[in-house]
Image (spheres, rainbow, N blue to C red):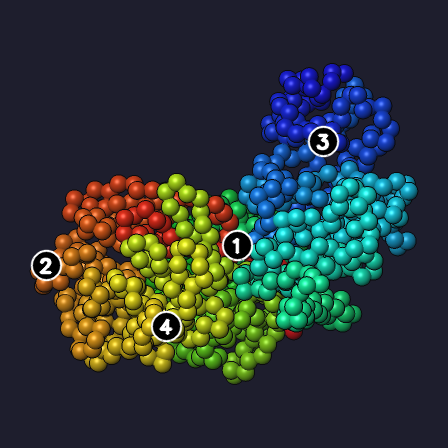
Amino acid sequence: MSQPSSLLGKTLGHYLVLELIGAGGMGEVYRARDARLERDVALKILPAAFCQDEERLRRFTLEARAAAGLNHPNILAIFDIGTEEGSPYIVSELLEGASLRNRLLAGALSPRLAIEYALQIVRGLAAAHEKRIVHRDLKPENVFVSRDGRLKILDFGLAKLTQPDQARSGSDAVTLATNTNVIVGTVGYMSPEQLRGQTVDHRSDIFSFGAVFYEMLCGRHAFTGDTNADTMIAILKEDPLQIPGTAPVIPPAMEGIVRHCLEKNPENRFQSAHDLGFALEVVSTGTGASGFVIPPAVTPQATPKRRALRWVFASLALASILSVGAFVALRNRKQNLPSYHQLTFRRGTIWSARFASDGHTIVYSATWSGNPLSIFSTLPEGPESRSLGLANADLLAVSRTGEMAVLLHAVNLSHFINRGTLARVPLGGGSPREILDDVQQADWSSDGSNLAVVQLVGERSRLEYPIGKTLYETSGWIGYPRISPGGDRIAFMEHDVPDDDRGWISVVDLAGKKTRLSEEWASEQGLAWSGDGNEIWFTASKSGEPNALHAVALSGKERMVARVPTNLMIHDIARDGSVLMSNYSYSTPVVALAPGQLERDLTSMDGVRLFDLSSDGQSFVMQYYGEGSGTNYISYLGKTDGSSPIRLGEGAALALSPDGKWVLAALNFPHRQTVLLPTGPGQIRYLEHPGIEDLGDGGWMPDGKQILFSGREVGKSARCYLQNIDGGAAHAVTPEGITASGVLALVSPDGKTVLAIDAAGKRVLFPLDGRNGREIRGLGPNDHVIRWAEDGHALYFYRTEQNIRIYELDPVSGRTKLSREVVPSDVAGILGGPTVLLSGDGKLCLYSFARYLSQLYLLTGLT
């Protein structure tokens, strides 16, 4: 047979060799074309010069046998194996991306990204270990990062099948002998027992994973030496290197996991990849910058104060490790604890999920790897999900007769709530039949004959059942309507403020009588009736902690059902009590982008929203609504140079004054109030607006001495008002029905015109001297105005399509010009549209978005 270097253009079996794409000690890898299935694949073949090497051939065959028995999203899929003129080859899926080693050449990963990668690696290892396969050569070179952020474990060439349990029998019980006196693997990632040539099991992979995880967090090897022999001695005798002080902020619990993986004695490590994965899930919500940095080792010259600090941090780390251990121990206790079975494995966001009418099939909607929202089905027995071919569609409900209620052309409003066209689709396949526009949520009656819907009518959210009969409406919003098993009432989440997930659990009967069953929750997402109809189960939190699973009876009695250290969201409860639940991690990255420069990550905390950027692009204001933010949230002043943000005080930040000395903010509780927060020396000012209610958001006049805001007087329609910040009464400056457009009151640089909305909902430029306004041409309904250009002759606005496109608009002629296009480097899990800010000259762009990364689980045993 030809040498591998001359294989290009040759056909092996039914695979046409196209190009060489890689080479290593186990062979050369080519891109090839599968003529039968018409797809590109990776073809790995041993060079002919090594075909007589019995040990190499044996290891090559062993890789094929081991990997072919695995079917998991985080393990390279093997399609075929064959030989051509004595040279064996393996055919696998073709990956696009780079190895983890290439990614680590740039240095350490952020803790958040490191733990995302770690979870994927551990899930792949857990699947292999369940098949009694040990990798034995886990290292960054054998982990591939695809372009969509999916990790794949490669090269099971050193894997072995351990001796099956005596209880196992049948044709799948296979034993492959391995000479334990031969050391195989890669120095630096091998476990102590592997280096000693002892028999290894799955816990050896856990040690190797610990070394890889350390490197992801720190950007350097856990064990090093001048020679391979020195590195081996370090693994056998020494502790891993201290995490350097230059490493990213790493929570102590995460360091505890690394060190627990790297124990010398296998008995002292995590005893399974499942336990390791559970520990990673526990700390996954604590990967932000609020974690603790473990200081470097104390040198002989260290001061007593430094020694004391070291013991403080060590104590914190130990406490975190014990917390993780407690969760793992509880999980393994032989008692009636709930069972968690993971159903999805891709990177993205679960939006909704329901049991099908058979009580076994699971249907869900999700956005995977930044792709459009789509609907899938899966079974608990396997990790694969099947697309139902409904793109840009959100699942709302599945009837007992096998019909789905879906939302077509879904556009996100806030949180997990979309707006679109309600349609009915047979679960078995068929074209959607459209029913109603402007729908947000829906649920089937128990017999599948009627639908309850939440429809957006004007500015009000309306609950109807059946369609056309209004049971309840609000100027806020209604979430997750669920018809009771008896069909006599509907449970839902009641929210007073649009876009805010603060609210109550309520029920309404068929006569329209509404009853609040719960106290107010700071955040609530997801609701379902228990199988017997005696309780409503929901996921919520009181004061910023992760959403937990609660239940409330019709009497109003509440109880806790389950809590874990990550956000939970309930989707459905089956007749047998099984629960569909997703977990999710939440982040709000803040990114700065200037022309000709790379992105700069300005993220300092999670749970923030951007509101204003100074004209010179040096300062920005944001609201913090995360843990501990309270009912009124907290305002912060950030700097685009990356320095730590400054806490200004209680209130939801809205706008920065032109001179940068004040931040306009709003207090919502106990009543709506305007507050001015000083950015430097000074006292907080409270502005009163007697006689004006339903206060809207506002902005600054160019002189920095007055604010403009929306509101209405009793018995009148909303309009715009001006008020001096030094005191005095507010006075109306627009007719009734003319209100400020968007979150900020955008006043032109000359102070003469405000961007407003008229009574018909059109965006207009309205002179503040009382003359009539004129409609702005060139703006679509989903276009977001950012600010006026410095010269006042143009407006900047953006629209979100696949990417963020920023335009300049001439408000007189309506002509638009594309200014720039912003492409986020990672689009997975982005929920809803971004917030985009610009400096006065339009050059510096600051943007932020909400990222939800989640997986779907089947829970049994909850009571």
Identify which residue is drawn at 60% across, 67% down: 565
Which callout, 3 or 4, points at the residue further toward the start of the chain? 3
The spot of residue 735 in percent (x, y) is 14, 66
Identify which residue is drawn at 73% across, 27% down: 45
Which callout, 3 or 2, points at the residue further toward the start of the chain? 3
Q: Report the disc number at residue 772.
A: 2
User: In the rendered image, is residue 160 in sight?
Assistant: yes
Asked whether the beta carbons under mark 4 and mark 2 sit within 8 Å of each other, the answer is no
Asked whether the beta carbons under mark 1 and mark 4 sit within 8 Å of each other, the answer is no
What residue is disc 4 on?
651
Q: Quadrant of the C terminus?
A: bottom right
Identify which residue is drawn at 29% across, 41% down: 818
Q: How far apart are marks 1 and 4 (CA)?
A: 30 Å
Label 4 secondary element: loop
Looking at the picture, which amino acid does disc 4 mark?
Answer: Gly
Q: Residues within 10 Å of mark 4 (few under 14, many from 20)?
A: many
Which callout, 2 or 1, points at the residue further toward the start of the chain? 1
The spot of residue 720 in percent (x, y) is 19, 67
On the picture, is 423 further left or further right than 685? right
The spot of residue 166 in percent (x, y) is 90, 53
Q: Quadrant of the N terminus?
A: top right
What residue is disc 3 on?
24
Q: Distance between the residues labelled 4 and 2?
A: 35 Å
User: In the rendered image, is residue 449 in sight?
Assistant: no
Q: Distance between the residues labelled 1 and 3?
A: 36 Å
Looking at the picture, which amino acid does disc 1 mark?
Answer: Thr
Q: Residues within 10 Å of mark 2 (few under 14, many from 20)?
A: few
Which callout, 1 or 3, points at the residue further toward the start of the chain? 3
